[in-house]
Amino acid sequence: MKEKQYKRTTVTAALPYANGGVHIGHLAGVYVPADIYVRYLRLKKQEVVFIGGSDEHGVPITIRARKEGITPQDVVDRYHNMIKDSFEKFGISFDIYSRTTSKIHHTLAADFFRKLHDEGKLTEEVSKQYYDEEAKQFLADRYITGECPHCHNEHAYGDQCEKCGRDLAPTELINPKSTLSGSAPVMKETKNWCLPLNQYQEWLKRWILEEHKEWRPNVYGQCKSWLDMDLQPRAMTRDLDWGIPVPLEGAEGKVLYVWFDAPIGYISNTKELCDAHPETWGNWEKWWKDTDTRLIHFIGKDNIVFHCIIFPTMMKAHGDLIMPDNVPANEFLNLENEKISTSKNWAVWLHEYLEDMPGKQDVMRYVLTANAPETKDNNFTWKDFQERNNSELVAIYGNFVNRALQLTKKYFDGMVPVCGELLDVDRQALDEFKDVKQKVEALLDVFKFRDALKEAMNLARIGNKYITDCEPWKVWKTDPERVKTILYISLQLVANLSVAFEPFLPFSSAKLRNMINMQDFDWTQLGRTDLLKAGHQLAEPELLFEKIEDETIGQQLQKLENAKKENESAAYKAKEIKPEVSFEDFEKLDIRVGHVKHCEKVKKAKKLLKFTLDDGSGEDRTIVSGIAAYYEPEELIGKDVLFIANFAPRKLMGIESQGMILSAENFDGSLSVTSLLKEAKPGSCVG
């Protein structure tokens, strides 16, 4: 089947969440590859728009605002401005970077929802959700904490346990508590409007699994795993006070689900750009409704489901919008062999990098592209950063450019010499070089940015080897005419490098073009050997890159070490006292002494132990506890422990657990089973 030819391309980059800064994981996963692709299309003189913006709604923002005692708007204003400024300084060349708190976005998102509602594309579903009677509001997942049913971490959230990493539903938590009041929430009915994904499942299967087999394996595979299951309706509204109000009567106190409104931000930001500059960009609809427009989403792997299943379903239901042609999602980038963690400050923040290493935007762009997590998670280390800068950018690319320009200045007063007769060594260099445009182009067209960068750097290697083999500084003494040819060819390679690296390293490419006085350039010039005519005057040469010393890298490693020490220090501080409870509430807990008659590991469960207790009743009691990581069963047999006797039984790994063993959580997260100073009979009550 012949590939469709498009007139223009709409490129979007995932909207960063405005409750913190941007780090190198975000850059490697989304923004650097998106910027490379857009710069490449612009170089080819193709019509393209590059859309970005801040995602400013959702629960994490309200949590940060509550913690800091400020408004959610204060939070998003702070981080939107920080992120926008960082992107601009780093060279992420958005045509617009706007935000989802803008008036135009609120209007467009509300209109989008109302259209789906009025056309019967949404379903109304009544469900039970946790409600805080003291705070008088429904609780989002992150406003609920409790004991994880898997690892028994008592501080798991309603959507995830950060200790064992399991995804959770709020109803799975043991002893759930509201983070707003500290009280136990109750289940209460609420109505929400849902997107019936199940009605679009067959269409999604055809569109993705049959029509887009060219998508990256990680994207295609994740979509397939979802589509192999039965999709269910997904709520597109939430009971919150921060977000876009649901534009329906009777929906007071409800807002649009952040994953409904955020992707519409791509459209509203395009409309904002087009409305402000119609003479340049035309009407926004040509970028989102015209079938001659190609739509590309750049995202991280955690957003695949939203961009490949939920948002396309929204657009399909809407009826007038084009579908994404490709969604080149990257995997995750680790930092110094550990997962990047914003909560632990284990990250390299973009705004801090720009301050610590001024003028080195392209070094980071180069390293993140060379080490891009395109097909699997990858790792960033500061030593590798230093090594790639010093041994590749400085020693190969920069060295070749500097030698070619300095020798031209020395021997020909900075003027491009006339090319003479070619020798075999010249022809070999030109022969190796002739396919560079085709190779780089073929890789960029299919989003293989890491390999494309290798091909661009290979051009620098060809040049560096050529000038080293020819040794014009020696030949000058015996054959000055020969030096003219050597430097002419070298300068043509230099000029080509300024084009080849433009999508990847825009700052150094611009600097290089200034040094060679090359003002006009585009992609079609790549591969030509007459970019700089004989007699063309070059400007004053400068070093394109500079060596990064151990001291600079040591400072960055020390910063990470300090973050690790701060986290360890914080871990060894007692947690805040929980909200006060009445004595009557305490009396409701029936805490008793139990004698451990038997203890064994639960099969296929690394963290669970099965206790058989003498609880003084004359019958054995079975309790399952998640402490296998801290005790061998033999250590506990014969011990007296405390347990809660009046918890409702729960099944764990098929075993009915009749209570909970009491343990103390140490500052490092380990657990210690409670014991007694004096003997007490099994069944003795604590109180």
Image (spheres, helix red, strand yellow):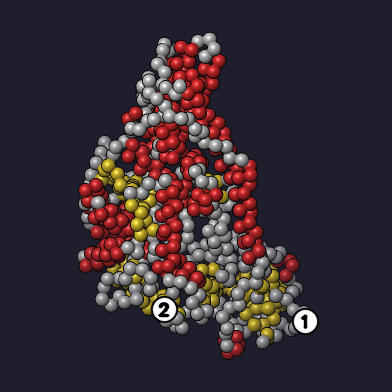
Residue located 60% across and 74% down the image:
576
Q: Position of residue 498 (x, y in %)?
A: 41, 32
Crowdedness near tag 1: few (<14), some (14–19) or many (≥20) residues, C-alpha within 10 Å: few
Vertical comparison of 331 with 145: above or below: above
Drawn side of residue 660 relative to residue 243, left or right: right
The answer to which of 306 and 549 lies nearer the viewer is 549
Instruction: Report which quarter residue 387 is drawn in.
Output: top right
Residue located 38% across and 70% down the image:
242
Drawn side of residue 137 relative to residue 470, left or right: left
Tell me the quarter of the image containing the C terminus. bottom right
Res 93 label = none
Res 679 label = 1
Crowdedness near tag 2: few (<14), some (14–19) or many (≥20) residues, C-alpha within 10 Å: some
Residue located 68% across and 85% down the image:
686
Instruction: Report which quarter residue 5 is drawn in.
Output: top left
Q: Position of residue 444 (x, y in %)?
A: 38, 37
Q: Is residue 375 in view? A: no
Q: Position of residue 376 (x, y in %)?
A: 49, 45
- The residue where tag 2 is placed is 137
Q: Amino acid at mark 1?
A: Glu
Q: Amino acid at mark 2?
A: Gln
